[in-house]
Image (tube, rainbow, N blue to C red):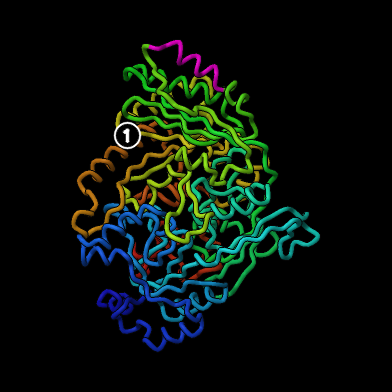
Amino acid sequence: MLASAQAATSGALARVRPGDQGWPSEAQWNELGQQVGNALVKVHSPLMTCLNSPDSDDCKQLFKELKNPYFLGDEAGLTQSLGWVDAWTSMPSVYAVAARNTNDVVAAVNFARRNNVRLVVKGGGHSYQGTSNAPDSLLVWTRKMNDISLHDAFVGEGCEGRASPVRAVTVGAGALWAHVYDAVTTQAGGYVQGGGCMTVGVAGLIQSGGFGNFSKAYGLAAGSLLEAEVVTADGAVRIANACTHPDLFWGLKGGGGGSLGVVTRLTLRVHELPETFGGVNMTIRAASAPAFRRLIGLIVDFYQQKLLNPHWGGQIILRRINVLQIAMVFQGLSRSEAQAVWQPFMDTIARAPDDFKLEFSLLKIVASSARSFWAPTMIKKLLGFISTDDRPGAPKSNVFWTDDQWDAGHVLHGYDSAWLPATLLQDGQRQTLADALFAATRHWAVSLHINKGLAGAPAEAIAAARDTAMNPAVLDAFALLICQAAEPPAYPGIPGHEPDTALSHRDAQAIGHAMDEVRKLVPSAGSYVAESNFFDADWQQSFWGSNYSRLLAVKDRYDPDGLFFVHHGVGSERWSADGFTRVA
């Protein structure tokens, strides 16, 4: 209370907290409740059960549930990540408007603005930066706004006669990609560019820019955005597209979620579905550090020669234990065609049995009908590729990639990323790149997400990405390099389940050393806003580069008083770290 009073007398704007003189009265909250019906809820975190009774059966069951991303997403008081050591801890809002429609969102935005209450927005709840939660706040929770509808010939509002009709899908802001893929691909035989993780929310991904398994073919998810409905800070409902509020439309495409308004509905282009999707999975162990250095050089050469094209996505993972892991996907190729692409590389490995060992893998290269790629078929379940929401009565469409379960409820120790420009793949540069990657692996594992760079993508995908707020570095990058570390679900103050602070500090230090090796090669690489370092001091340049000044102008036009605040979001430099006190 004192901090708020001091800020107010100094002339700085300070938002109110419970206990402050200006905090809304019970009557005012009841009035909001009358406007939104039973959508206004008092938020309680299920973790309070464990804080009060850490050894109880209910607490033990809760920590099992915390590995189910759908359980996390259905709780107003939880987020998909439970925190980041020394950065943030998942904390519930005081109240939430569990919005069912746009009018509910308008009521919540107006209430927060008029009463000077900290506002936070959550859809899927996937934010490594902690941007979808804030204590002492009002939460706009869009999870129930999850309708999905398909269009054979969509034209944006105000674009009649200026744009050709296209196949499209309109989704509510709370929809998850698993459900969108089910509707668009499995049921309707089309393709929409979304996220690789099926439990990520549609709206958050689009506003981050958005990458999926096949972005090297179809570009950014934001590049396929045709129109958005958004509630801005003045409570107005605006349609943003290329013809109406084009500046806001541009900013929503990669400008970061929660900074410019509350997106309530999005319409995305539906692309033609290729005949096949497939995957390549293999693990190669090098016998020594020098052999591993050679192996990195081989995969870098092979990638430049055979994989830098729209067919390929996924990851190339380089581990400290001298192991190369291939976890890649492809589109538009048959299994035999994919095998032919990889055969020269596998022959090279086979010719050096003393240096390299290909570990056993039942399914090195697989392909299937693209239409069934996201379908929870029995064979995918048996092989452990796909897991399902195991709660009684859960919808059959509640599925997720089993490998993504590490994300559910985890606590981050460290995370960082860097775009790697395609110039590093030129003759005379690849050895230097391989040396830097090897040096990084002496400290920590690095993963090359080759679908998260648009070098090698079709010209139309690159052009669509250029017309977004994303850091232009993505246009010329062949991959996004990621270093990260986390632990299973943990929470401060719960005995037996507290984060391992000492291990976290060691992991963070190792990640820092690994990224130092990368940045010796690419000093100003830029970073992806959704997968980045919480502590990045140069975040404006890292996330948006030359686009930041334009983004800030959009922010000033649609949210001049800074109602919308997220950590390292557009305009957040004008506020204290918690978003409660204006500092500039």
Left or right? Give the position of 494 relative to 448.
left
* Nearer to me, 168 or 108: 168
Q: Amino acid at mark 1?
A: Trp
Task: Work out whether 85 lies above or below 475.
Answer: below
Q: Quadrant of residue 518?
A: top left
Q: Residue at x 31, y 79 (%)?
A: 9
Can I make out residue 142 in this image? yes
Left or right? Give the position of 7 relative to 376.
left
Picture quarter with the C terminus: bottom left
**Which residue is under mark 1?**
444
Q: Which structural element holds mark 1?
A: loop
* Nearer to me, 479 or 358: 358
Q: How many marks?
A: 1
- Estimate the x, y position of residue 529 in percent, counting from the top left: 46, 50
Task: Work out whether 126 lies above or below 275.
Answer: below
Picture quarter with the N terminus: bottom left
Left or right? Give the position of 237 relative to 485.
right
Highlighted magenta segment, given as a residue range:
342-353
- Estimate the x, y position of residue 140 in percent, counting from the top left: 46, 70
